[in-house]
DNA sequence: TGTACATCAGTGAACGCGCGTTCACTGATGTAC
DNA sequence: TGTACATCAGTGAACGCGCGTTCACTGATGTAC
């Protein structure tokens, strides 16, 4: 059965190599948290790793590739967290799933603000993520969110929505049709468009809190504020 | 009448000085647009200004102060743009004012993505904005937005809102009471809380577009998408 | 109106620092016969 | 089982670069008498 050549058990060297790469990613994340993405430096990672600076080039092609690894790692950590939270909710409780997803995003973002900033903050100047490697991990949350909405629609659990008189312009309807086809969805244009707003609004709320836009003193009850925002968004989505 | 010592006409030297500072800010913004905030460098600005690097220290105390100047400049440019757009709408057309504000934010953000990122993106590592200088300019948009909401409420132009059964927890109500007192507002808790969501959602939508979260191909009809988002947010706000 | 002095803008050299990346190399670890 | 060779991890020096900030200085511009 050697057609699947990947199935061999890893050699000690391979294991050591994987461990070192994992260490590099871990140290890179720590560096990210302290100094930000723009200041991420291979030399600093090498220092923390206890190795001469040129040695990291055995594991990582260049600085941009380290950024890519960190990006993928962060996307997957967030994705795992979201999946875990949503999976813990009853499959028919779509509103509960939505709230679990929102809270998972916020909790992770507050715990890992630097990684969150890398994923959802200002683009890193001069860095372009390689789509073929990041698109999968990078779309896990939205795919999951859309899954909840579409599941609710199919189950007939989607209430009348806010402002049903709002019309969808044809050009936008075209985009939504592509999305519907690509993701195999059933929900109509209005629901999908509403979903996009809820999606961007969720991250808008989290970003404001994580990036310090609220100021130091304005909101003491941040958890309650976010809970309220989720409640309203839930209504907007029709859940 | 020398008590108001500030009223003297500026000397040529003062005018030259003001002009140079304006040039520094302008060049700093260009640099920001190309290389990002973290890479903003006094030496590069000095080069563009055609002057030796130490000369800029005659005008700007250090790198952080240049960042502060850029921050204030950007906040005021955005504030002017928003004020201009809202002022152009009939004072009783609260929904129109809201849409004008939203579109002004988006247009400015798309035109000046680097400045937008400085204001609303990831925090610049190691930089803390001096509140006493930035709070005023930095709150112009939210003050204006709240003004529209409160004006609508006082004019009795605020419709029934989404999900009126959503309760405001006491801790959050306390925060909202402080805001109401501080800003001299009339609107009740539910409206204020809704206003916060609309505020964060508006910037969430703009940030996703400016920061490239939509991906390259998903939405061709970005203008229409944003228009739709504004429509739904308008309903959420009760306008 | 003319002179003496103070203020200011800009210079150029220097400080100490960190960065990404390349390259020839040494040793250790694995593999093929 | 033993030997020859290939692979790989890590070294250390070097390249050329840009950065923030300080400091003593030169000249030009303004001000007071």
Image (cartoon, coloured by chain):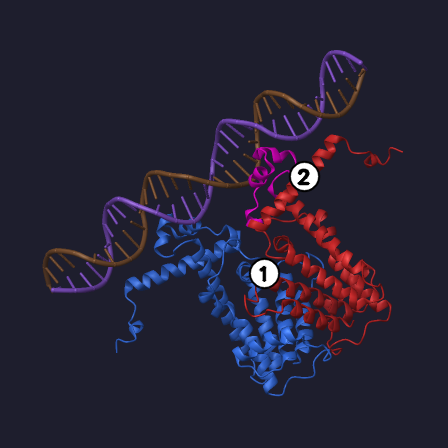
Chain colours: A red, B blue, C brown, D purple
Point 61% across, 71% down: residue:
B199
How many numbered tags mark residues here? 2
The residue drawn where x is 28% and y is 66% is B11
- Residue B75 is a magenta residue: no
- The x, y position of residue A87, in whole percent, is 81, 58
Identify which residue is drawn at 53% across, 81% down. B184
Question: Dot 2, how many residues are within 10 Å of its Cα: few (below 14), some (14-19), or many (20+)?
Answer: some
> What residue do we see at 83% from left, 60% from top?
A184
**Closer to the camera in the image, B75 or B64:** B64
Mark drawn on residue A21: 2
Provide the chain ID for the residue under circle 1.
A
C-alpha span from label 1 to label 2: 30 Å
Q: Quadrant of the N terminus of chain A?
A: top right
Image coordinates of residue B90 in percent, x first then y, are 56, 83
**In the image, residue A110 lies at what x, y percent?**
64, 58
Under circle 1, the secondary element is: loop
Q: Earlier in the sequence, mark 1 or mark 2?
A: 2
Q: Residue furthest right?
A: A1
Q: Name the chain under label 2.
A: A
Q: Determine if residue B214 is in view.
A: no
Highlighted range, magenta? A35-64
* Number of other residues with Cα within 10 Å of mark 1, as a class: few under 14, some 14 to 19, many 20 or more: many
In terms of secondary structure, where does tag 2 sit?
helix
User: Do discs 1 and 2 belong to a common subunit?
Assistant: yes
Tag of residue A211: 1
Q: Is residue A54 above or below residue A116?
A: above
C30 on left or right of B149: right
Residue B117 screen position, x and y as percent: 56, 59
Q: Classify residue C25 as left or right of residue B233.
A: left
Residue B26 visible in image: yes
Tell whether position A38 is magenta: yes
């Amino acid at each position: 059965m050697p057609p699947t050549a990947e199935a061999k058990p890893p050699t000690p060297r391979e294991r050591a190599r994987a461990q070192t790469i994992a260490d590099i990613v871990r140290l890179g994340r720590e560096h990210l948290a302290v100094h930000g993405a723009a200041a991420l430096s291979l030399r600093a990672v090498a220092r923390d790793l206890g190795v001469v600076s040129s040695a990291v080039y055995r594991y990582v092609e260049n600085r941009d590739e380290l950024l890519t690894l960190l990006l993928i790692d962060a996307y997957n950590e967030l994705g795992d967290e979201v999946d875990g939270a949503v999976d813990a909710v009853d499959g028919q409780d779509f509103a509960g799933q939505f709230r679990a997803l929102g809270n998972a995003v916020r909790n992770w973002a507050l715990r890992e603000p630097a990684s969150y900033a890398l994923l959802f903050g200002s683009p890193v100047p001069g860095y372009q993520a390689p789509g073929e490697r990041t698109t999968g991990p990078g779309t896990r949350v939205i795919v999951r969110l859309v899954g909840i909405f579409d599941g609710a629609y199919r189950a007939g659990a989607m209430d009348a929505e806010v402002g049903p008189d709002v019309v969808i312009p044809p050009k936008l309807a075209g985009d939504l049709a592509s999305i519907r086809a690509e993701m195999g969805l059933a929900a109509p244009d209005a629901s999908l468009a509403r979903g996009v707003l809820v999606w961007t609004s969720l991250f808008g709320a989290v970003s404001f809190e994580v990036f310090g836009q609220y100021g130091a003193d304005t909101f003491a009850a941040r958890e309650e504020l976010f809970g309220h925002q989720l409640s309203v968004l839930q209504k907007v989505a029709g859940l």
